[in-house]
Amino acid sequence: MSGKDKHKSDGECLICLSDRVRSGIAFGSAYRDCRACGFVWRVDRENFPDPNRAYAEGGESVQALIEQEASPGRTAYYKAHLKRLHHVAKPPGRLLEIGCGTGGLSKAARDVGWDVLAIEPGPVLRQAAEQLLGPERVLGCAVETAKLQAESFDVVLALDLIEHLPDPFVLVRQASEWLRRSGVLLLQTPNARALRRRLYGARWNMIQPDRHFLFHTARSLETLLAGQSFAVLSLKTVSGIGAGSVLRRACESLYGGVLSVLGMGNALYAVARNTGSK
């Protein structure tokens, strides 16, 4: 039974199945907010015939990513993610990045010994990734349609992706299938209880109707992962993308640490191990 089939109405939480659901509190009337686990979702998310079209068309945000690729800040961003990864898994091994963007993180992983495969559906970003990785290492498809061998990867990376997918279960379900037993999933997504969300309410810059359909809290994300055979090793909030100047990154590290203690950082960062108990 699919995740969609389990749920009777928008009066029931998609993640924890609680009926403690309200609408229009902080995110606007198109969203529902579960008071039990904190998960937030757009009720009309399946009415977008071409979700994330801006990425496919190569808009301003896509061009900005491409232009930043060679910057020292971007290099530092990739190093920070690899450092987090290498706390729980080290090369050699097979690594899959879902939604690789320009391919910079996958290239950084390959350069330190990982055997890398990447998925990027956006044609402009995919072309940039192919230039870094080679076309044989980049699949131009969505996670929903990717055909990969089961239990063939040691690591799956999915950074700033799950919020873009109308189906709240597909990414974690596919990652569980593609990972070997004891393989590791690293997942990053906006934090529904971030300080910025509390300050800006419905004006929070993460609320983008045709791009961001789902918002997790630490509790809802842990519930989602547990429901797909993952044991959570680490789940915390982080702030800043680590792509600015040395001074900016130092400041982000300082205030990000404080916000993390409070659970109010900009993004949730989860590390989970596949238990293989399907």
Image (spheres, helix red, strand yellow):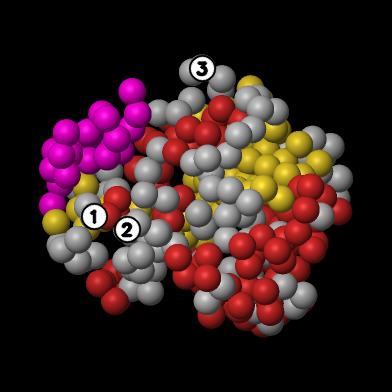
Residue 254 covered by magenta stretch: no
Q: Badge 2 is on which residue?
A: 48
* Disc nearer the start of the sequence (3/1): 1
Q: Position of residue 139 (x, y in %)?
A: 67, 48
- Name the chief secondary structure element in magenta: loop
Asked where in the image residue 9 lies, by quadrant, the reply is top left
- Magenta range is 1-22
Q: Position of residue 66 (x, y in %)?
A: 67, 74
Q: Position of residue 215 (x, y in %)?
A: 35, 55
In this rendering, is residue 241 above or below 71?
A: above
- Judged from the image, the secondary structure of the residue bearing numbered disc 2 is loop
Asked where in the image residue 221 lies, by quadrant, the reply is top left
The residue nearer to you, when weighing 109 against 272, is 109
* Residues at marks 1 and 2 touching, judged by CB atoms closer than 8 Å: yes
Q: Residues within 10 Å of mark 1 (few under 14, many from 20)?
A: few
Q: Residue at x 47, y 70 (%)?
A: 54
Determine which of the numbered discs, if any, sits on residue 277 in the image: 3
- Judged from the image, the secondary structure of the residue bearing numbered disc 1 is loop
Q: Residue at x 71, y 50 (%)?
A: 138
Q: Residue at x 29, y 69 (%)?
A: 198
Figure quadrant of the N terminus: top left
Nearer the observer: mark 3 or 1; the answer is: 1
Amino acid type of the residue tagged 1 in the rendering: Asp
- Distance CA(mark 3)–CA(mark 1): 33 Å
* Residues at marks 3 and 1 touching, judged by CB atoms closer than 8 Å: no
Nearer the observer: mark 1 or 2; the answer is: 2
Amino acid type of the residue tagged 2 in the rendering: Phe
Asked where in the image residue 114 lies, by quadrant, the reply is top right
Q: Badge 1 is on which residue?
A: 44
